């Protein structure tokens, strides 16, 4: 999370609710890569949305990561580019899930209850990452073809994508 990230700040009450719901089984830690002084200063400011002090809205552990070691070990290692991003680390200290904190409720409950299928999630996550990398390659090639007004290459890219998956036009929505 970061002090400047609107979705991160808006999600603080949700994470507080999850911490409360799973008290004793889960420790939620919000890590910002900003300097400690900035994080502490932010925590004692009033929220625009509900007029509470941020420290009263974040009833979970909040930490600063000014050397970006957590950023590197988690976000960069998992090839995550945006925040907020949540990592659920299981009882055996292995990452169980990576995603948006607003979508972690059911996953967290399954991890706590030992009903989570880590292997299936890992396979699905890896496949999704491969799809996203392929879409990035296509988008880059398409931008280059359009920038250089090479319409034959642009059409070839579109034809290739449609041949691969005629139903998936999301990457061609431009």
Image: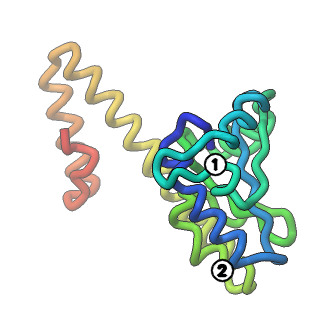
Is 96 in front, or is 87? 87
Is 140 in front, or is 174? 174
The N terminus, quarter of image? top right
Dot 1 corresponds to which residue? Answer: 54
Is 48 in front, or is 148? 48
Residue 49, position as x, y percentages in the image: 46, 51
Residue under the point 58% across and 44% down: 46
Circle 2: element type: helix
Circle 1: element type: helix
Crowding at dot 1, Cα within 10 Å, few <14 / some 14-19 / many 20+, comes out as many
The C terminus, quarter of image? top left
Residue 126 seen in this snapshot: no
Dot 2 corresponds to which residue? Answer: 109
Give the Cα separation between the discs numbered 2 and 1. Answer: 26 Å
The relative height of residue 114 versus residue 153 in the rendered view (above or below) is below
Residue extending farthest to the top is: 148
Q: Which of the 4 image quadrants contains residue 145? A: top left
Residue 121, position as x, y percentages in the image: 60, 69
Residue under the point 63% across and 40% down: 45
Depth check, mark 2 against mark 1: the one in front is 1
Is 66 in front, or is 163? 66
Residue under the point 66% across and 64% down: 16
Residue extending farthest to the right is: 92
Residue 87 seen in this snapshot: yes
The relative height of residue 116 versus residue 18 in the rendered view (above or below) is below
Q: Is residue 37 left or right of residue 52?
A: right
Crowding at dot 2, Cα within 10 Å, few <14 / some 14-19 / many 20+, comes out as some
């Amino acid at each position: 999370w970061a002090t400047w990230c609107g979705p991160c700040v808006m999600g603080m009450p949700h994470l507080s609710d999850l911490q409360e719901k799973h008290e004793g089984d889960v420790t939620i830690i919000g890590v910002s890569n900003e300097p400690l002084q900035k994080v502490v200063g932010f925590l004692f400011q009033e929220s625009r949305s509900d007029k509470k002090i941020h420290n009263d809205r974040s009833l979970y552990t909040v930490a600063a990561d000014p050397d970006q070691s957590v950023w590197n070990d988690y976000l960069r290692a998992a090839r995550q580019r945006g925040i907020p991003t949540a990592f659920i680390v299981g009882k055996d200290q292995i990452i169980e899930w990576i995603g948006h904190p607003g979508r972690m409720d059911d996953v967290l409950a399954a991890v706590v209850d030992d009903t989570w299928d880590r292997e299936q999630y890992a396979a699905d996550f890896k496949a999704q990452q491969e799809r996203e990398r392929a879409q990035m390659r296509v988008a880059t090639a398409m931008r280059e073809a359009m920038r250089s007004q090479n319409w034959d290459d642009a059409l070839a890219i579109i034809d290739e994508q449609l041949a691969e998956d005629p139903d998936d036009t999301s990457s061609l929505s431009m």
